[in-house]
Image (spheres, rainbow, N blue to C red):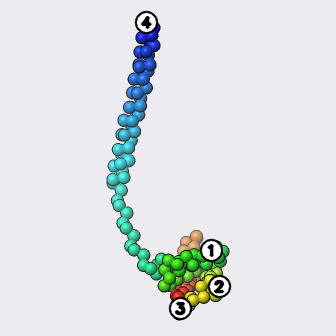
Amino acid sequence: MSKESDSAETPKAEETKTEKPKTEAKAEKAKAEKPKAEKAAKKPEKKPEPAKSRRDESVVFVGSKPLMSYITACVTQLNRNPEELVIKARGRAISRAVDVAEVLRNRFMTDLVVRNIDISTEQVKTAEGNVANVSAMEITLVRGT
C-alpha cells in the first residue's frame, strides 16, 4: 500500500512544480504587458483627417498601368459620384490620360462631356536633389444632357 500512496503523491508533487513556472510565466507576462499598455497610453491620438470633398473623391490619377485599368477606375468613380470626374496626369502619362478620357467618352459612357481642361507645370525634386519642371494636366468630365 505504501507503494501506491507514493505513486499517488508523486504526480501531485510534479503538478505543483509545473504550476509554479506557469504562474511565474504569467506574472512575467503581465509585467511585460504593463509597459506596453503604458506606452500605448502615452502615444498621442491621431487627429481625424479632414473630410474629403466630393471633388477629391472623384479624381483618377493616371500613371503607367494599362489603359483599361484607368477606364475601370473612372467608371467606378462615376458610379459613386455621377456628377463629375477629374482625370489627372503628369509628364509622359498625359497622353494616356487623354486616351482614357476619349475611350471613356466614345465607347463606355457616351453622355460624358468635357467641362474643362487645365494644364500646368509642377516642380518636382529629382533623386539627385535637383528641381525639375513637369507638365501636368487635369481633364474634368461631367454628365451631359
Residue type at the position of mark 2: Arg
The x, y position of residue 52, in whole percent, is: 42, 75
Quarter of image, res 47: bottom left
Q: Report crowding for label 2: few under 14, some 14 to 19, many 20 or more residues within 10 A (C-alpha).
A: few
Note whether 95 is above or below 14 in the view shown. below
Depth check: 106 or 63 in front?
106
Sequence-wise first label, 3 or 2 = 2
Q: Do the residues labelled 2 and 1 touch (CB within 8 Å)?
A: no
Observer-side mark, 4 or 3, equals 4
Q: What element carries label 2?
A: helix
Whole-percent x and y of residue 51? 39, 74
Write the residue at 55% across / 72% down.
129
Q: How far apart are marks 2 and 1 (CA)?
A: 15 Å
Give me the C-alpha separation between circle 1 and circle 4: 83 Å
Label 3, label 2: how far apart the Cα atoms are: 15 Å
**What residue appears at the point 65 percent right and 85 percent down from the top-left corner?**
107
Instruction: Single out the residue that lies furthest toward the bottom.
Output: 145
Q: Residue at x 33, y 54 (%)?
A: 42
Residue 120, can we see it? no
Check disc 4 and report its element: helix, strand or loop: loop
Tag of residue 69: 1
Tag on residue 144?
3
Specify which label sits upstream in the sequence, 1 or 4.
4
Disc 4: which residue = 1
Label 2 sits on residue: 107
Circle 3: is it few (<14), some (14-19), or many (20+) Cα within 10 Å? few
